[in-house]
Amino acid sequence: MKKKISHAPHIAGLIALAASSMGGKSAPLDRQLRAATIGDLDMMTRDFEALGIRASCIHQGKRGEDLKQWTADVVESIHTENWMRDRHLLMVNAAKGDREAQAELAEIVMESVTNLLMAQGNWSAFFGLQSLADSDVPMLTFETPREIQFEVIGTDGGVKTVQADLEKNQAICTLFHLWSDEFEYPLVDLYKGSVANLALATIDVARDLAVKINSLLGGYMLVGGADSRFGAFTLDDSPQAHYVAHSGIHTSNLPTTNLPTITGNTSSSLFRKEVLDAFIEYVQSWGSGALPGGDLQMAGIHLASKNSADWVKQLSMSSESNFITEQVFQGGQVVSYAGYKFPIIFDNTIPATGAGYAYLRTNKTVGKMFEKTGLDMVDTRESKRGNKGAYSQGKVLGFGMCNPWSVNAAAVKFRDA
């Protein structure tokens, strides 16, 4: 009998990657020390150009275009000597304890973190981002006038349940600091006098935080996790209910799970047309005007990167030429079918062994991500004799989810364990 592969250890590892850097559990000097990016501007240019293309694929519409423009602006900036020199002086002054320099540096890294997160983070695309003022209280609000429970990610990285106020349908979301790893860089190059490593250390911090945030959210999205957003709906009119249907709706039309099943799965089956059919049926089953804020629309499908060639594997040189096969022959993917477009994001954090799942992201979010940029912190230190400086940042974040928002996404298993 073939042993089934569990994804639970991988999911727990994703959460642990961020949880170990949350709150006060890791003091600045206890964080992992890593070398900052070597100042190769050509490499950085290629990275940001690729990131811009990726952002426009993950985020459809204005957000994707804005992020693509942001990456173009970064490329232009890092090729400007004044930018490098100014960033160098800013970091040096911050390391010396200049509070204004530290505040400005935190603001720069905050912008980098937020944009890199939105451009790079696959799972963060399922969440809506809300920036708060220092004195704002992060509130989770649900529009339907009934009692409801929310789940928030606590300061230890675990999910806890909070009861919403019955009249206002609101709950306070837990905030915490998430710290980046500490990045070490040379202060001076005795021959080149280069400041690129120092200036680009802030980008390393942004990327590290983006990876940790993406991993944390992935741990609560992947099927198989204890708190996954996917599974059978609760339909008992309780605070945990995913939805309560209006009396005028015949409930036989509505989905009872956001984990619909398809036939024909084996331990070696591929991502295929039946998955698209299941996603189309899930979106259309809600009918018109049933969900608050408008109908569901497909925004992307997230798939393990190892499955990137699954469409190609299903064709041969003698396959009949039609609208579907031509898409595969020309571009390697089916991107348009039955009146829908299917942007596919290949994610190497999704398990490629055992049971295989495809994840549908729609135009609606499954949760909220809060940030308080005014309370972000930087931690810098340097050793002139050792010609080494170190830099890290703590970002204030909070995440909230509830069952009624889970209907805004779906997952389909296309391969058995």
Image: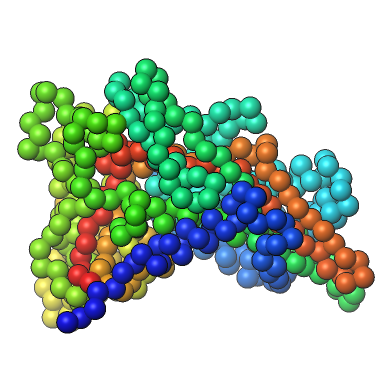
Q: Residue at x 56, y 49 (%)?
A: 115
Q: Residue 255: percent from the left, percent from the top?
A: 15, 42
The image quadrant that residue 180 belongs to is bottom right
> Height in image: 351 above or below 255?
below
**Outermost right residue:** 385
Q: Residue 27: percent from the left, percent from the top?
A: 70, 56
Q: Quadrant of the N terminus?
A: bottom left
The image quadrant that residue 25 belongs to is bottom right
Q: Quadrant of the C terminus?
A: bottom left
Figure colour scheme: rainbow
Q: Say whether residue 272 is left or right of residue 202.
A: left
Q: Nearer the viewer, residue 390 or 271?
A: 390
Q: Residue at x 54, y 57 (%)?
A: 18
Q: Residue 305: percent from the left, percent from the top?
A: 37, 69
Q: Say whether residue 384 is left or right of residue 151.
A: right
Q: Say whether residue 278 is left or right of residue 330.
A: left
> Height in image: 281 above or below 368?
below
**Outermost top residue:** 167
Q: Residue at x 58, y 32 (%)?
A: 132
Residue 293 shows up from this direction: no
Q: Nearer the viewer, residue 231 or 405?
A: 231
Q: Residue at x 10, y 68 (%)?
A: 264
Q: How many numbered dots are placed on residues in this image? A: 0
Residue 103 shows up from this direction: yes
Q: Nearer the viewer, residue 203 or 407?
A: 407
